[in-house]
Image: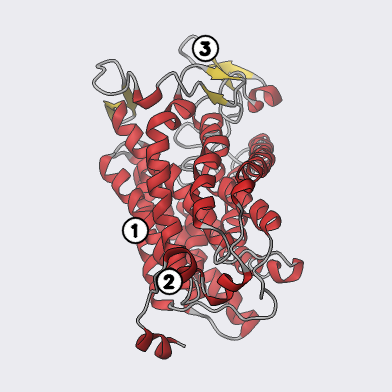
């Protein structure tokens, strides 16, 4: 689990490379700093109250847990009774804290790509702390901590199809929702937050008039490769042990990502006449996102189909920003929201019923029930995140969201950080 946590932590610097390469040369440092700063802010906040809000026992309306119950990890470290039991055995709860904090970090960092090149760095830091508190911690509690979007007896799933005996003297949802590693908690959450922010903050000043091109495609591909590597900790680690579920998640992560890359490239070839390196890298991320909630519940053949559809869907979805006029700078909405929704809902079609999950439409006559549950939790996650993100935006508005037009034109790196990614002699070559 510690190795898996370390792999997931690597994903945030990998995301910095991916986003940094996609940015223009005059904004690459700020883009990378937004990811790195998420590690700084969320890492502290999670230890103070994030773990308690996500996984505490004192539930508040099924939305979050008492942030003061385990404030500063009180009662977590060194307590012989605080162990996590998994299919592979038990391990100290503090190890689980280490694993879960990396999820919170990457989720916040993902949002940054949508608002590239135009947001004050100080406001971003404040937003990271506010948003993770209002949106991420409650979502983690609702899905994984026994809240409204979980399998608990008081969840939405239980309200829809009732409860059954869990075999331990309690009740559980008759049709339990599935989010193996973060389709709702991470990707729908980050993708919807990104959409709300781009609508509220607005476009870059030259959006629609200037072609925004990645300044370093090799950096993009390196970042995508490291994301793929770190994602094995993300998905296989969510089996909480070296077991069959982890092995299935590893295989599914591999084949779904491969299929999504090919799906994206084929879509590009048909639509544009050329498969691109940016498309390959983006297809990798689309596949990783889509398989995240389904990694432990689908067969590898289903994972291939899920990934291929995700690659094609996202390749088409990233163009919607030009049709509808919203400036999703680095395609967070087009990739993470779209693929996160598809992966979450596709479980209702492709789940095989292994590893204690219900079967989907293609494997069971009652599979439609799981499909309904998956759609409900996806919609509920969308609505909740939209509201919480809007509140976080308003809370941070007195700080000022936008840099000036002059600073945006000259480059946010110099304006916000007084730095340049490349020496002047190199800049000419890059241009």
| Residue located beneath label 3 in the image | 170
| Residue at the farthest right position | 324
Would residue 418 appear left or right of 342 to someone viewing this image? left
Identify the disc placed on residue 229: 1
Tell me how far mark 2 sits from mark 3, CA to CA.
Answer: 49 Å
Mark whose residue sits in front, 2 or 1: 2
- The reply to whether residue 410 is visible in this rendering is yes
Identify the disc placed on residue 150: none
Task: Indicate which disc, 2 or 3, sits on the residue closer to the N terminus.
Answer: 3
Residue name at image x 38 percent, y 47 percent? 40
- The reply to whether residue 302 is visible in this rendering is no
Mark whose residue sits in front, 1 or 3: 1
| Residue located beneath label 2 in the image | 220
Tell me how far mark 2 sits from mark 1, CA to CA.
Answer: 14 Å
Residue name at image x 45 percent, y 42 percent? 104
Mark 1 crowdedness (10 Å alpha carbons): few <14, some 14-19, many ≥20: some
Mark whose residue sits in front, 2 or 3: 2
Question: Residue 311: which quarter of the image?
Answer: bottom right
Image position, residue 384 (x, y; %): 66, 37
Image position, residue 320 (x, y; %): 70, 67
| Residue at the farthest top position | 169
Tell me how far mark 1 sits from mark 3, CA to CA.
Answer: 39 Å
Task: Indicate which disc, 1 or 3, sits on the residue closer to the N terminus.
Answer: 3
Q: Is residue 399 above or below residue 28?
A: above
Helix, strand or loop for disc 1: helix
Would residue 347 appear left or right of 372 to someone viewing this image? left
Residue name at image x 44 percent, y 68 percent? 20
Residue 89 vs residue 27, the one in the foreground: 27
């Amino acid at each position: 689990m510690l190795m898996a946590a370390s792999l997931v932590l690597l994903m945030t610097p990998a995301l910095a490379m991916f986003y940094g390469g996609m940015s223009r040369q005059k904004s690459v440092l700020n883009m990378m700093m937004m990811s790195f700063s998420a590690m700084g802010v969320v890492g502290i906040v999670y230890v103070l109250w994030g773990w308690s809000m996500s996984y505490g026992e004192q539930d508040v309306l099924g939305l979050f847990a008492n942030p003061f119950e385990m404030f500063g990890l009180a009662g977590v470290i060194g307590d012989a009774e605080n162990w996590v039991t998994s299919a592979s055995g038990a391990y100290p709860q503090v190890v689980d804290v280490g694993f879960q904090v990396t999820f919170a970090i990457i989720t916040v960092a993902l949002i940054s790509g949508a608002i590239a090149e135009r947001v004050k760095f100080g406001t971003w830091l404040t937003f990271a702390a506010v948003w993770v508190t209002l949106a991420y911690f409650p979502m983690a509690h609702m899905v994984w901590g026994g809240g409204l979007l979980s399998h608990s007896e008081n969840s939405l799933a239980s309200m829809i199809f009732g409860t059954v005996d869990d075999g331990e003297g309690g009740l559980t949802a008759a049709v339990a929702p599935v989010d193996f590693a973060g389709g709702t908690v991470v990707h729908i959450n980050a993708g919807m937050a990104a959409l709300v922010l781009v609508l509220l903050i607005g476009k870059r000043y030259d959006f629609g008039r200037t072609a925004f091109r990645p300044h370093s495609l090799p950096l993009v591909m390196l970042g995508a490769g490291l994301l793929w590597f770190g994602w094995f900790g993300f998905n296989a680690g969510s089996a909480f042990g070296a077991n069959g579920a982890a092995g299935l998640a590893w295989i599914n992560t591999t084949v779904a990502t491969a299929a999504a890359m090919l799906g994206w490239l084929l879509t590009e070839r048909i639509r544009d006449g050329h498969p691109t390196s940016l498309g390959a890298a983006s297809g990798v991320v689309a596949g990783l996102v889509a398989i995240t909630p389904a990694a432990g519940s689908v067969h590898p053949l289903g994972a291939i189909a899920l990934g291929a559809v995700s690659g094609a869907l996202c390749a088409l979805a990233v163009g919607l920003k030009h049709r509808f006029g919203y400036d999703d700078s680095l395609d967070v909405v087009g990739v993470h929201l779209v693929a996160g929704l598809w992966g979450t809902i596709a479980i209702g079609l492709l789940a095989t019923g292994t590893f204690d999950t219900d079967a989907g439409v293609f494997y069971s006559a009652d599979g439609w029930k799981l499909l309904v549950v998956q759609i409900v939790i996806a919609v509920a996650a969308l609505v909740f995140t939209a509201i919480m993100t809007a509140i976080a935006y308003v809370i941070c508005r007195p700080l000022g969201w936008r840099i000036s037009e002059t600073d945006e034109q000259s480059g946010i790196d110099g304006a916000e950080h007084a730095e340049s990614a490349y020496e002047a002699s190199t800049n000419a070559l890059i241009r």
